[in-house]
Image: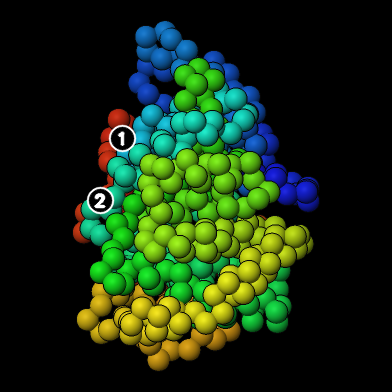
Amino acid sequence: MAAQGSMADKWDREIPVPAHVIGYVDPGVRKKLPVGTTVHSISPSGKSFWARTAKIEATGADGTDTPFFIKVNQFQHGRNMISSEFASMTKLHSIMPEMVPEPIAWGAYEEEDDIYFFVCRFVTMSGDIPDVGDFPALLAKMHQRGASADGEFGLPYVTYSGRNPQFFPPSRSWEECFTLGIKAEFELEERTHGPDEEMRRLRDGVLAIAIPRLLRPLETEGRTLVPTLVHGDLWDGNASVDTTTGHPVIYDAVPIYAHNEYDLGPWWAPRHRMTSEYINKYSLCNPPSEPADDFEGRGLLYRLRFDLHASSLYPGSLKRRGLVMDTMRELLARYPHGYEEYSLDHGLSPDPLTPDSPRSSASPSSSEEDSDTELLGFDLPCWVGEPDPLTPDSPRSSASLSSSEEDSDMELLELDLPCWMREPESAEFPITAQGEMTGVMHQPLAV
């Protein structure tokens, strides 16, 4: 994810990756480039708070200029971030190649330990946001192409937005998937900034009142949602224009299968440049889901998740937490009586999720209560002293850092991989030209 510089506060911490790793092109990188590539040079390019980024000048087998973009990270946490980005961008490129730079490979440096890289085609970008005349329509097309084959929301693996993980367990219910995902975000945010009584009060209100009121009607009264692949972090800093073609380009995705309107969440934030005009243009191509009267309310809810994750990324900066709390107050002021009032107005059962309704294995039972120690509501939170389900003999998951690997701020945010991660029945990502399976990451991909 690109550094979010739209806020007034500054992030002045050193990038937690040594600068010299983009001072040369490691043999491990060269081996993953297309056959016949000749590397000429490497120089810093782009901006990230969490990794080192650079441009590799190269020519292809036919002698034409073929530059590449490289992102470099370190330690197991960085490996997870890199492998996740490669799988995510590969999936997104497979359905929208005209708008997503082609991923090439990911792997490990050979001359240094615990250094990992992601390489894609280099795109010279304008530095400006895409034009409202074509970008919303292209995004709508991406959503239309990206329908889930199995009808499930979420993903069976962890993605990363910035340095923090994102959890959206597979479910056939969007309300359930989103609820579990945003509970994880609340946990991350509290680990970053510490507990706050008002924050917790508002959180509990959003979980109990606003989410059921806004998401449950999408899947009641005979309505259904088709899960579609979304970018997942589509703010101003993750979209631009290819100066060669003039076409919009998107990058730094954290995709999940979601309600298509979820991708518009950042556009509801007035501090961004892609705002109401982009939302209106998108709606001409993909009209709001019914009930359409809730469109703006759902936008606020999806914006909340985006701002909540952003707040979790910056220890010591409470401005984003303030935005989060303001949005929660607005949601609760708009919908004080939750789904109960809606159901009474429409002659519905207050809780349509009967025992016969499709629910994921990650779902808590209806009798479970949220608590400070089990905020996320998974059947068995893996980060509460339970062995990693992916490696039964290991006391920690592969997403965890040892105390020697990173600073205390980074370690504060680490969660072990959640228990709902599972082996898929079939691979969801294609094989690259280099013959590497970019399969679903129930564990980090092998280099």
Question: Local crowd at mark 1 within 10 Å, few (<14), some, or many (≥20)?
Answer: few
Placement of 326 over or under 282, stated as above or below: below
- Residue sitting at x 28%, y 66%: 223
Q: Sort mark 2 into few (<14), some (14-19) or many (20+) by Cα contacts within 10 Å.
A: few
Quarter holding the N terminus is top right
Determine whether the residue tagged by mark 1 lies in a helix, strand or loop: loop
* Residue at image mark 2: 427
Where in the figure is residue 432, as x and y percent of width and height? Answer: 31, 35
Q: Residue at x 62, y 52 (%)?
A: 269
Q: How many labels sit on residues?
A: 2
Q: Secondary structure at mark 2?
A: loop
Q: Quadrant of the C terminus?
A: top left
Q: Is residue 434 visible?
A: yes
The residue positioned farthest toward the front in the image shown: 345
Q: Amino acid at mark 1?
A: Thr
The answer to whether residue 386 is above or below residue 426 is below
The colour scheme used to paint the residues is rainbow
The disc label shown at residue 432, or none: 1
Is residue 100 rendered to the left or right of residue 164? Answer: left
Q: Nearer the viewer, residue 338 or 344?
A: 344
Q: Residue at x 74, y 46 (%)?
A: 14
